[in-house]
Structures are given as C-alpha cells and as structure tokens.
Amino acid sequence: MKLVVLSALLLLSLVAVSSAEEFDFFYLVQQWPGSFCDTKKGCCFPDTGKPATDFGIHGLWPNYAKCKTRGELDGALEMVTKRKKKCWPENCNSEPLKLWEIKDLVTELDANWPTLACKSGKSIEFWTHEWEKHGTCSNLDQHGYFKTALGFKARHNLTGILADAGIVPSDSETYFLSSIRDAIKEGTGFTANLECNRGVAGETQLFQVYQCIDRAGKNLIDCPLPMQGNCKDRVQLPAF
C-alpha cells in the first residue's frame, strides 16, 4: 500500500513539474517549401491552394540553452524515471487550440504557416499540433503565440533577405552555406542556425532556418547553441 501511495505521489510530482517548465529562448523555425517537397516523401498542398514561394513557419519552439537530464528537472526522481536528456519542454498542459481565439489571424496563418504534409490538407491540424506540443509551454496565450511568430516572420522576410544577397531559388545553382548564414545575419542583425535535407537526387538542400528569440518573445538574439544541421559547404535552394 505504501508503495502504491509513493508511486502516485511521484507521478503527481512529475505532472506538477512538467506543467511549470521553464525555458531559455525560442526557436522560430521556418522551412523552405521547395526543400520540403523535393524529397522521396514529397508533399501535398493545403486546401487553400499552393503556398507562395516563400519560407513558411514550422513553429515557435521554447528551448533550453543546455539540455537537461531528468535529474536536473526532477531531482532525485531521475533514478525512478530513468529518462534521457531533454532539450526543450513540450506538451506542458492539455489546453486545446480554440479556433475562435485566433480567428482574426487565420488569413495570415494560411499564407505564412501552411501545411505541406500529406496527412491532411487542413493547416488547422498543423497549427493545433504546434500549439499543443510547443505553444502550451510558451507562457503565451493562443493568440499571442501565433501573433508572435507571424510578427517576426513579417519583420524579417528571409526570402527577401536571401534574394538581396543573390541567393534565389534554383534547381541548378548551389550556394555557399556560409553566404546564406552571413546574409541572414546581415539582414536581421543576428546569427541563425541552419538545417539541411536531401533532395530526390541526393543533393543537399537548405531546409529550415532557426532564428532565436529571447524568452519574453520580444527580440531576436544570436542563437546560443550550435547546431549540426546535416549541411555541406554548398547547398541548393530548390525551386518551388
């Protein structure tokens, strides 16, 4: 009986900790649609039609500056849970996304945060996933979470920043990764992390840009963590 009570108390402690998780900064993650689609898995357009040839938001993700062991998060409970390191909080509560909370943002979200996955053509399912996994840990309400992501994307147009540096979509041209990184720093004032994937023919493509935002969700910052983004010295930005 004592063991059952102890186990219940430990589970309640875990729930309490997970619902009050802290973090150090946000990643604003934007993906290039040409790279998403030019893979063996392919893509599907949302029910609103083909998105613009522009970076689309993947998510606004609270993140730790240093990955934490479960022991750092839960003290002595590490020996009980034996969980691996955790680099970000997720699913911090069970609050569902309510469409009426963001109804004034839907047009902007359709244009800037479209789904390309083939599970469903409904971007609302993508937004719901991002809210439940990441937004519930953001210390922002639903409207504030999506408005913050849209605001940063609008203020720092990555497609335009790269175009100004001569980096434009092409199925034949390749670009130095360092030139892309430098262009983003020049255009935004801050360093970002880059992630690549592989195209159908095996070419290395710029897939996602991770911009870093302070914990308050107010200002861009230099990304505090290096990222092994599966990139090479030269990459493509495939047409879309």
Image: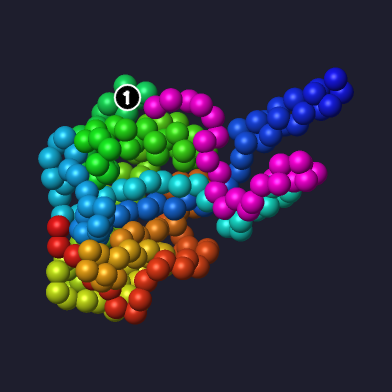
Vertical position of residue 72 compared to residue 99: above or below: below
**Foreground: 185 or 18?**
18
Specify whether residue 164 is painted magenta. no
- Write the residue at 35% across / 60% down: 209
- Count of picture labels: 1
Q: Position of residue 173 (x, y in %)?
A: 17, 76
Q: Position of residue 49 (x, y in %)?
A: 12, 40
Our reading of the magenta stretch's main secondary structure is loop
Vertical position of residue 203 compared to residue 77: above or below: below
Q: Position of residue 137 (x, y in %)?
A: 52, 38
- Write the residue at 69% across / 34% down: 14
Residue at the extreme right:
2
What are the residue bounds of the magenta stretch? Answer: 73-97
Render colour scheme: rainbow
- Tell me which amino acid carries mark 1: Leu
Counting other residues with Cα less than 10 Å from the Cα at mark 1, is it few (<14), some (14-19), or many (20 or more)? some
Q: Position of residue 23 (x, y in %)?
A: 57, 47
Vertical position of residue 38 compared to residue 108: above or below: below
**Foreground: 60 or 218?**
60
Disc 1 designates what residue? 99
Image quadrant occupied by the C terminus: bottom left
Kindly state the secondary structure of the residue where label 1 is placed.
helix
- Write the residue at 29% across / 78% down: 234
Residue 188 visible to the viewer: no
Image quadrant occupied by the N terminus: top right
**Foreground: 100 or 69?**
69
- Write the residue at 40% across / 68% down: 230
Specify whether residue 74 is painted magenta. yes
Residue 235 location, quadrant: bottom left
Residue 222 visible to the viewer: yes
